[in-house]
Amino acid sequence: MVRSRKWGSLLVGMTALLCSAAMASEAPLSSIDRRAVVEDLGRTLEANYVFPDKAKTISATLRAHLDKGDYDDAKDKAALADELTRDLIAASGDLHFFVGVDPGFVADYAAKRDPALAAGLQAKERQAEQRENFGFTDLRILDGNVAYVGLSHFADPEIGYDAAAAAMRFIENSDAVIYDMRYNNGGALEMAQLLASQLFRGDKDQELFDYYYSDDGKRVERGQWVLPALPAKRLTGKPVYILTGSTSFSAAEWFSYSLHKLGRATLVGERTAGGAHPVDRKPVGHDFFVQVPIGQIKDPVDRTDFEGQGVTPDHAVASADALAVAHRLALADIAKADPAKKDDADWFAPTLAVPAKATPADLKAIVGRYEGRRIDIVDGKLLYTWRERFRLQLEPLGGDLFAIEGVRDFRFRALRKAGKVTALQRINRDGTTTDYARLD
């Protein structure tokens, strides 16, 4: 089923690389062995590669390398797989290609034709995904009621539906949402479809992705649309931001690209990797497999893609800074939609600015005893103590302003006279203040 396909993942390739090194036989390969692998690989490419004509050219290129003796130094399976991977990428320019050694995968691929064995394999996959929480690595409600969804990959929704449903319910009451695709290597496009459906009305047809793929010589054409029934409330009309980075790949890029094309999301971060083609893993002989691009996806607006180019963000910033920038933009959007919430944007703005750099002298200036409280330097950081029992760190926000660890409703400002700190002022979120005179 297409639902179980991995729609592009750098992680798949990296995992397979480790598997290849661990499982490859140390028995030397003969010239007959190498030729059999190259010939079988060529047939697999021609039956599955997204561009059949190009597959023939690539296959011929691999045979030419073989005939010239370019693979003669590949004495074991892992070495041959590595060389074939490099040549496939060089001949195609497609980073999705990967050749690995995994006899277990080949056996499992054949076993999937047996329903009982297929159920066992799915149980294994579910256990592996459970350890990664089906890709949902981080769910938070940020200041100002902005939801944050961190995803390492898109799991198959057939086994990850409950986790996705819980995540969708967690964010359903937010005023805006940020999806983090910066480190997402791809996965099942159907999971992207499920999550994206929460952002649209369910009573109106809306296409998200349009694609076709090849499966052992069979061509399949499909479109994916907004789902009419969901396990959570929809976020229609709520601002949406997607964080992107150079390691955003394939399905993560499609999630970003299509939502941007549909005018439903603003992208913040860096240009993505540019892997637009869906992929599948196919067996080659008894021990090898190839991760091969099997199709093309088009956006629902003007039928384009981003293969080899990547997705360009609306706000180009370093990926490490993307969350803070998106958070600020989301707060501004919320305030624009509801002026009553403008105070939230103003209040949290200092905490989302570039972190203030406080010198040792700056820190030392505020150290001292104040009415009912004191401030010390411990391990190079400011420690605020009151009633001799409660202790929290202070974080410099710039301009003699300090945030308090874990506290959202007030912050402190150091008040000065003639350059010396003479009082600690508590600034409450409602604008009221209380001053605590310095006692030393």
Image: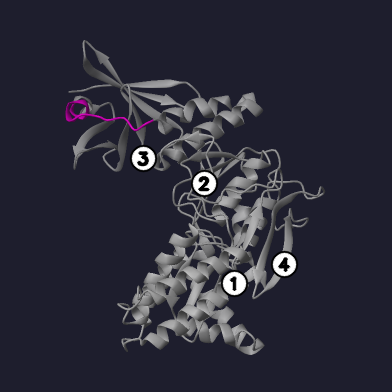
Q: CA distance from mark 1 to mark 3?
A: 59 Å
User: Looking at the picture, which amino acid does disc 4 mark?
Assistant: Val
Q: Of the two numbered discs 3 and 2 on the same chain, state the one appearing first in sequence.
A: 2
User: Looking at the picture, which amino acid does disc 3 mark?
Assistant: Glu
Q: CA distance from mark 4 to mark 1?
A: 16 Å
User: Looking at the picture, which amino acid does disc 1 mark?
Assistant: Glu
**Which secondary structure lies at badge 2?**
loop
Q: Which mark is residue 46?
A: 1
Please report the residue visible at 48 percent of the width from the left and 43 percent of the height from the top: 271
Residue closer to the observer: 256 or 80: 80
**Residue 68 located within the stretch drawn in magenta:** no
Is label 1 in contact with label 2 (beta carbons under 8 Å)? Answer: no
Of badges 3 and 4, nearer the viewer stands: 4
Q: CA distance from mark 3 to mark 2?
A: 42 Å
Please report the residue visible at 46 percent of the width from the left and 21 percent of the height from the top: 432
**Residue 383, position as x, y percentages in the image:** 26, 38
Q: Is residue 159 visible?
A: no
The magenta stretch spans which residues? 354-364
Q: Is residue 104 visible?
A: yes
Of badges 3 and 2, nearer the viewer stands: 2
**Residue 89, position as x, y percentages in the image:** 45, 62
User: Looking at the picture, which amino acid does disc 2 mark?
Assistant: Gln
Q: CA distance from mark 4 to mark 2?
A: 25 Å
**Residue 359 located within the stretch drawn in magenta:** yes
Is label 3 in contact with label 2 (beta carbons under 8 Å)? Answer: no
In the image, taking residue 21 as reference, residue 265 lies left or right, namely right
